[in-house]
Amino acid sequence: MSNDTYTPPKVWEWDAESGGKFATINRPIAGPTHDKDLPVGDHPFQLYSLATPNGVKVTIMFEELLAAGVKDAEYDAWLINIQDGTQFSSGFVDVNPNSKIPALLDRSGDEPIRVFESGAILMHLAEKFDMFIPTEPKARAECYSWLMWLMGSAPFLGGGFGHFYAYAPEKYEYPINRYAMEVKRQMDVLDRHLADNQYLAGDEYSIADMATCPWYGAMARGVLYEAAEFLQVHTYENVKRWTTEIFEREAVKRGAMVNRAWGEPSGQLLERHNASDFDTNTMDKLMAAAEEQQA
Ligand SMILES: N[C@@H](CCC(=O)N[C@@H](CS)C(=O)NCC(=O)O)C(=O)O
């Protein structure tokens, strides 16, 4: 255990120079920092997001709905660059007072409806279109339970383990130990459940899988925080089986590209406005336009 200790002062004060990957955007106060409206496209759904695991949950759902033939699920996906603080613009805060992606404006009815929190967005869409949510009460309850499990658990994986293992300016044994233990326990919870169930809610692929796979599936594939060996993720065989099955879905592959601003250029689609945006030519043009808008 580290010998470095910290004695908290009587009153905590904001140290803007505290370091770490997100030091420049972390603030102890809510609300907008500047006036700027959000762009609005032609489609009934306006999504403001970024392809982090929380963002990808929702783009996967839209692509699944469209793949299933739900034409009313057409959406514009606008890139929100959280490193630039776009989540603190007045327009974004109007849609999500919590200043975090993803945020959705549902303009399909008489009055626009704002929805924030990725789990709430998934439920809003699933209930609206009555898809990817089981109708049988027991399976529906399982779906809600696993979705809420994910919403409660992923912050330990990202904000806890990922932060202290990969992003903190210095590594300390105590927090890494605490969160490695919890993440391994969570992986084991999933692994045991998936030993007896094809999907989280049972036989039916649902929003619970769409929410969980970008986090724990990505972990099982070893693509999060370069922690595959440290956490021995290969031992979670059932999570791996489930992940492989879900990542093979075309809609999941498309969803994972939307609002992605890093990695292989062929895997990035900065903004999505039409199905044809996934074509290479259109993608090049859209990326150039989005980069110009961000500049
Ligand atoms: N519970 C929220 C978490 C969203 C979240 O943490 N979003 C991060 C990116 S993955 C974000 O926007 N961070 C920007 C910030 O903290 O300023 C959800 O699931 O929607």
Image: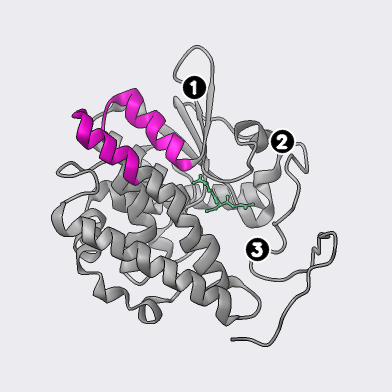
Look at 59% across and 53% down and name the residue there: 291
Which mark's residue is nearer the viewer, 1 or 3?
A: 3
First in residue order: circle 2 vs circle 1:
2
Magenta residues span: 118-146
SS type, badge 2:
helix
SS label for mark 1: loop
Decide: is 103 above or below 286: above
Kindly give the residue lying farthest to the top in the view shown: 110
Q: Is residue 234 above or below residue 59?
A: below
Left/right of residue 171 with respect to residue 183 in the rendered view: right
In the image, 46 versus 211, the foreground residue is 211
Residue 170 in the image, given as x and y percentages of width and height: 64, 80
Image marks 2 and 1: residues in contact by CB distance under 8 Å: no
Per the rendering, the mark at residue 83 is none
Q: Amino acid at mark 3?
A: Phe
* Residue wearing tag 1: 107
In the image, 105 versus 20, the foreground residue is: 20
Read off the residue under disc 3: 22
Query: SS for tag 3?
Result: loop
Compute the Cα span from label 3 to label 2.
Answer: 21 Å
- Is residue 223 shown left or right of residue 94? left
Q: Is residue 16 magenta?
A: no
